[in-house]
Image (cartoon, rainbow, N blue to C red):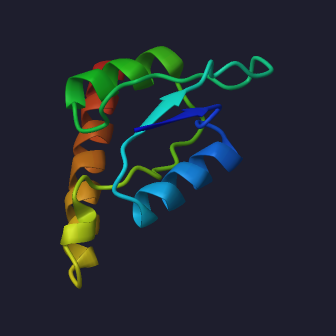
Amino acid sequence: MILITGGAKFIGSNFVHQWLAAQNEPVVNLDSLRGDGRYFFDRDDIDDAVLAAQFLRARRPCAVLNMSGEQGSHEVGMRPAVVAAGRRQRLNSNRDAATEAAT
């Protein structure tokens, strides 16, 4: 096991991804996630439609950029469309739940 401090930001997160791709050694990331007051971290799961609806209703983001990876997507191999379709379906369901909850 290696310990990374500050691994949640650009340089640290890139190092973590490269390390995990090249090594068989686990990583623990210790990061305060402090910034200049414009960055917030919420540990939640976008696949939880109720939670996603509550989050969207409370925070009201002006945009949603989906950069989450599908767990185990490296095992999908030559079928990336399967992963994309599943993720799109969940995001659409969450959007619909959030729209219903907001009205």
Q: In the displayed structure, does residue 59 sit left or right of residue 25? A: right
Which image quarter: residue 31? top right
Q: Quadrant of the N terminus?
A: top left
As displayed, is residue 61 above or below residue 96? Answer: above
* Residue 103 in view in this figure: no
As displayed, is residue 8 above or below residue 50? Answer: below
Image point (60%, 35%), residue name: 62
Q: Residue furthest right?
A: 36
Q: Nearer the viewer, residue 14 or 65?
A: 14
Q: Nearer the viewer, residue 57 or 13?
A: 13
Q: Nearer the viewer, residue 57 or 84?
A: 84
Image point (42%, 64%), residue name: 21
In the rendered image, residue 70, in percent from the top left (x then y), is placed at 28, 55
In the rendered image, residue 34, in percent from the top left (x then y), is placed at 69, 18
Which image quarter: residue 46? top left
Q: In the displayed structure, does residue 20 sit left or right of residue 49? A: right
Image point (25%, 64%), residue name: 73
In the rendered image, residue 52, in percent from the top left (x then y), is placed at 32, 28
Count of marks overlaid on the render: 0
In the rendered image, residue 14, in percent from the top left (x then y), is placed at 60, 54
* Residue 52 in view in this figure: yes
Q: In the displayed structure, does residue 18 sit left or right of residue 9? A: left
As displayed, is residue 32 above or below residue 75? Answer: above
Q: Quadrant of the C terminus?
A: top left
As displayed, is residue 50 above or below residue 89? Answer: above
Q: In the displayed structure, does residue 99 sit left or right of residue 27? A: left
Image point (19%, 73%), residue name: 76
